[in-house]
Image (spheres, rainbow, N blue to C red):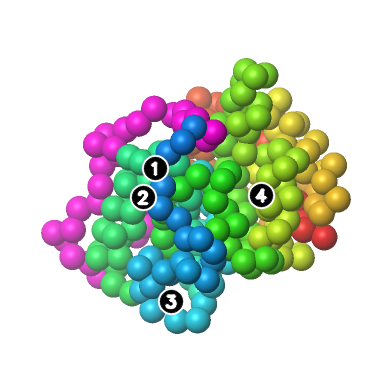
């Protein structure tokens, strides 16, 4: 992904290089990791993440945000909304944090609406967000966990969908993208079977302002494009 167009910025500020933050692609979300997290949402200190946050609340959550390509695009598309990237891998989350810091220094007054934290969204999502707080949840190119014994690690399942329904406001949306057909069918099946969600028809989904950005803004999406792979997208509404 090309970096944002440089307007007035400090030439001395360098963007981080991914080669210094490389980490294995897979992480066991069931394992015990060392995380700090608030006991409840009102104890979250958002001032540490968003300059001039005021009384605003996070509206978008990018679950497993990877190297932050889509998160940056999301912040540019909705400059008045707060978006949070949630990433379990320590080096990858460090890269996104450093990337956002550098972008803020290079583009004064911009990118103050995006932030990243290292956490396990499968365990701690309700610790960060109140009931019906979020407008959009994104699951872009999640780990497919191909082995049947590891399907319980998938970020979309019946139990977690009830948590997503809790933090997502009525009329809010879940976005899923993957290059694995079997995972796409798995996610669609589980979400459509949940009583709180309805899938948008493909024609309606394609009209979403984010539809063209979902497929290629992330580093994983660009990799799939380079390899001429298939991509599968679906959007669901919280009823």
Residue 12 highlighted magenta (yes or no): yes
Which residue matches tag 4? Answer: 175
Q: Which circle, 1 or 4, is nearer the viewer?
A: 1
Circle 3 Cα neighbour tier, 10 Å, few/some/many (<14 / 14–19 / ≥20): some
Please tell me which of labels 1 and 3 falls first in the chain: 1
Q: Which residues are magenta?
A: 1-30
x, y percent for residue 11: 16, 61
Quarter holding the N terminus is top left
Q: Are marks 1 and 3 in contact (CB under 8 Å)?
A: no
Q: Residue at x 67, y 36 (%)?
A: 232
Which residue matches tag 3? Answer: 53
Q: Is residue 177 left or right of residue 101?
A: right
Q: Is residue 181 left or right of residue 53?
A: right
Which residue matches tag 1? Answer: 34
Q: Is residue 105 in view from this perspective? A: yes
Q: Is residue 42 above or below residue 151?
A: below
x, y percent for residue 2: 37, 48
């Amino acid at each position: 992904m090309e970096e944002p167009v440089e307007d007035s910025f400090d030439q001395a500020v360098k963007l981080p290089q991914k080669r210094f933050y490389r980490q294995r692609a897979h992480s066991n979300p069931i394992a015990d990791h060392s995380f700090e997290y608030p006991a409840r949402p009102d104890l979250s200190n958002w001032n540490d993440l968003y300059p001039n946050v005021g009384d605003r609340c996070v509206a978008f959550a990018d679950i497993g945000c990877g190297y932050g390509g889509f998160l940056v695009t999301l912040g540019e598309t909705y400059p008045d909304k707060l978006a949070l990237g949630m990433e379990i891998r320590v080096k990858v989350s460090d890269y996104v944090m450093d990337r956002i810091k550098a972008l803020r220094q290079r583009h004064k007054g911009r990118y103050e609406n995006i932030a990243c934290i290292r956490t396990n969204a499968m365990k701690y999502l309700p610790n960060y967000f109140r009931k019906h707080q979020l407008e959009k949840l994104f699951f872009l190119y999640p780990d497919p966990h191909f082995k049947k014994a590891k399907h319980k690690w998938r970020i979309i399942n019946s139990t977690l969908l009830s948590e997503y329904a809790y933090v997502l406001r009525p009329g809010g949306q879940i976005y899923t993208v993957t290059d694995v057909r079997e995972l796409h069918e798995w996610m669609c099946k589980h979400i459509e079977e949940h009583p709180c969600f309805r899938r948008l028809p493909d024609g309606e989904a394609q009209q979403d302002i984010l539809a063209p950005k979902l497929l290629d803004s992330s580093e994983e999406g660009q990799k799939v494009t380079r390899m001429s792979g298939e991509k599968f997208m679906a959007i669901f509404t919280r009823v």
